[in-house]
Image (spheres, helix red, strand yellow):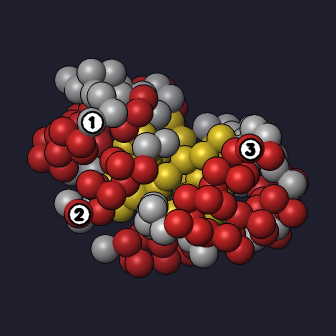
Amino acid sequence: MGREFVEQVEATPIIAAVKDDEGLARCLASDVEIVFILYGNICTIPDIVAKIKDSGKTAMVHIDLIGGLSSKEISVDFIKQYTRADGIITTKSNLVAHARNLGLNTILRYFLLDSMALVNIEKQFRQGTVHPDLIEILPGIVLPKMIRKITAVSKVPVICGGLIGDKEDVMSALSGGASAISTSNEKVWFM
């Protein structure tokens, strides 16, 4: 399952990140194939996912941002059992492992705020303690040199997300070695 998802990301490098119902409606009208869901709660997430799936798009739920879910594995079980989501996004490596066991696609999100964050990424991948399908680094406007460092250490394709605002940002991330970008900036979805 994960390899097909990675190939889809690499083939369609603009990913819509939606934060509300209005953004979701506009996203569904775009050519974007993959949608990161960054809002909702346990009562609304099944319907949000259904709208995306009914539009023929891939639905990835940022499980950390869904109201009523916790950082425990039961939250992943809920997404698998009660939604048609293709996978999860999270900052928690234990949830990545559990989601993979359930056959869900996984994205492990990192905030690259300083050199300590970079060391943490390198450490986790050297120790082999984490195995997501993809990693997402935020902010997405990091230096291409940092993207190359992360891809060299992780051997996992990288998505750059956050603060991607125009074609120059997209091209900088992609030319630096990112496989894709994610953005809530609707202008980028329609580029």
**Residue type of the residue flagged with mark 1:** Lys
How far apart marks 1 and 3 lie (CA) works out to 25 Å
Mark number displayed over residue 116: 3
Q: Is residue 15 visible?
A: yes
Q: Earlier in the sequence, mark 2 or mark 1?
A: 1
Query: Of helix, strand and loop, which one carries label 3?
Result: helix
Q: Of the residues shown, which amino acid type is indicated by label 2?
A: Asn
8 is higher (above) or lower (below) than 95:
below
The mark that comes first in sequence, 1 or 3, is 1
- Quarter containing the N terminus: bottom left
Residue 187, can we see it? no
Q: How many marks?
A: 3
**In front: mark 1 or mark 3?**
3
Image quadrant for the C terminus? Answer: bottom right
Residue 77, percent from left and from top: 17, 45
What numbered label is drawn on residue 101? 2
As drawn, 149 above or below 60: below
Q: State which tag comes first along the sequence, 2 or 3.
A: 2
Q: Secondary structure at mark 1?
A: loop
**Amino acid type shown at disc 3:** Met
How dense is the environment of label 2, judged by Cα within 10 Å: few (below 14), some, or many (20 and up)? few
The image shows residue 73, relative to residue 128, as above or below, that is: above
Left or right of 168? Residue 78 is left
Rendered image quadrant of residue 153 = bottom right
Mark 3, residues whose alpha carbon is within 10 Å: few (<14), some, or many (≥20)?
Answer: few
Residue sitting nearer the eye, 150 or 134 = 150
**Residue highlighted by disc 1:** 72
Residue depicted at x 53% and y 66%: 127
Residue visible at 37% across and 72% down in the picture: 2
Looking at the image, which residue is at 45% across and 61% down?
130
